[in-house]
Image: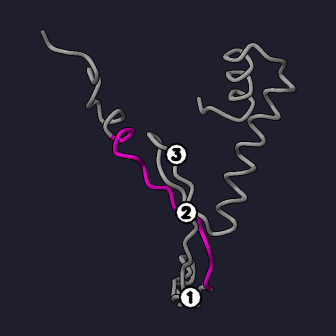
């Protein structure tokens, strides 16, 4: 089951011992700042998680899957996310014993 914004609000609420409304303001403010920064073309780097940045794509040719006719696809922008090395290692099972000594 995916983690959604309401779940994050609940986690912040219980983690900080604050009211749900206060937690919602914190979560909305953080995501609002991330979205605004990306919209301004700034890179957003969350250490241990990854990096978000705005990328432009140029116009190109595509194909309609139903009619197989060539279509001109317009230029656009999208958000790119690059996973951090630390998170990639945790997801692939590496670094589970990170910080622990093998005695």
Pick the residue in front: 27 or 58.
27
Determine the residue positioned at 60% across, 33% down: 2
State the SS at label 1.
loop
Q: Which residues are magenta?
A: 75-88
Distance between mark 3 and mark 1 Cα atoms = 31 Å
Q: Assess disc 1: are there few (<14), some (14-19) or many (≥20) residues with their C-alpha within 10 Å of its C-alpha.
A: few
State the SS at label 2.
strand
Residue of label 2: 53
The stretch drawn in magenta includes residue 45: no
Q: Position of residue 13 (x, y in %)?
A: 74, 19
Q: Assess disc 3: are there few (<14), some (14-19) or many (≥20) residues with their C-alpha within 10 Å of its C-alpha.
A: few
Residue of label 3: 46
Determine the residue positioned at 47% across, 48% down: 50
Q: Assess disc 2: are there few (<14), some (14-19) or many (≥20) residues with their C-alpha within 10 Å of its C-alpha.
A: some
- Split into 4 quadrants, where in the image is the N terminus? top right
Task: Specify the label residue 59 is tagged with.
Answer: 1
Of marks 3 and 1, which one's residue comes earlier in the chain? 3
Up/down of 44 relative to 61, above or below: above
Of marks 1 and 2, which one's residue comes earlier in the chain? 2
């Amino acid at each position: 089951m995916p983690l959604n914004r309401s779940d994050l609000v609940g986690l912040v609420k219980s983690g900080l011992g604050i009211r749900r409304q206060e937690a919602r303001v914190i979560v909305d403010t953080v995501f609002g700042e991330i979205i605004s920064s990306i919209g301004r073309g700034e890179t957003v780097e969350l250490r241990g998680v990854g990096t978000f940045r705005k990328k432009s794509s140029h116009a190109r040719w595509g194909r309609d899957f139903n009619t197989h006719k060539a279509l001109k696809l317009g230029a656009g922008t999208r958000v790119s996310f690059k996973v951090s090395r630390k998170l990639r290692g945790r997801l692939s099972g590496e670094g589970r014993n990170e910080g622990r000594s093998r005695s």
